[in-house]
Image: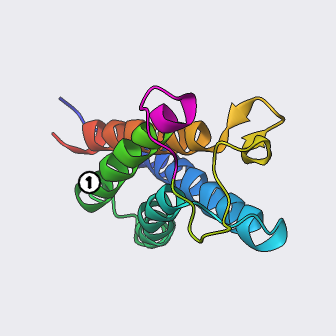
Amino acid sequence: MNPQPPSMTWNLLLLTWLVALVSTLSALFIGEVMGQAPCVLCWFQRAFMFPLAVILAIACYRSDFTVWRYALPLTVIGAALAFVHTLLYAGLIPQPIQPCTATGPSCSGAGMTLFGVVPLPALALFAFILIAILLIIIRRRTTP
């Protein structure tokens, strides 16, 4: 099996970083600019997404195609949290979403959707899944 040309693999790595960066900046925008404090599960998801933006930026700078080894575990754990959060949001897990403070927000509110349709936990899940897929493709292209 011949490895793929590095330019295409580098483009995939750059795309992976861009997904993590946009997700991170979006979460910061929602919290800091729009003033919507995150719920507890949102904080946990941020704890896994924010480092991905930094790790993947360094991997792009260094053209480190083995980044999947340390980025994929963060991505899988973040996706698992986002999946549970999405199930909670949909009401499939009969438990209320815990706010960060006694008067804090709940992700089940109408303000926690994109265009009034797509819930933020589902967007986070989509971002983690997309990053995982891209990391797996990078792994396949670089591992003989």
CA neighbours of label 1 inside 10 A, class few (<14), some (14 to 19), many (20+) = few
Above-or-below relation of 105 to 116: below
Query: Closer to the camera, 18 or 122?
Result: 122
Residue placed under numbered mark 1 in the picture: 73
Above-or-below relation of 30 to 118: below
Above-or-below relation of 25 to 107: below
Q: How many numbered discs, if any?
A: 1
Tell me the quarter of the image containing the N terminus: top left
Query: Closer to the camera, 89 or 70?
Result: 89
Residue at (31% x, 51% y) in the render? 77
Residue 102 is situated, as x and y percent measured from the top left of the image, at: 61, 70
Residue at (72% x, 44% y) in the render? 109
24 relative position to 35: left or right: left
* Callout 1 amino acid: Pro
> Residue 29 falls in which quadrant of the image?
bottom right
Residue at (46% x, 32% y) in the render? 87
Magenta-colored span: 86-97
- State the SS at label 1: helix
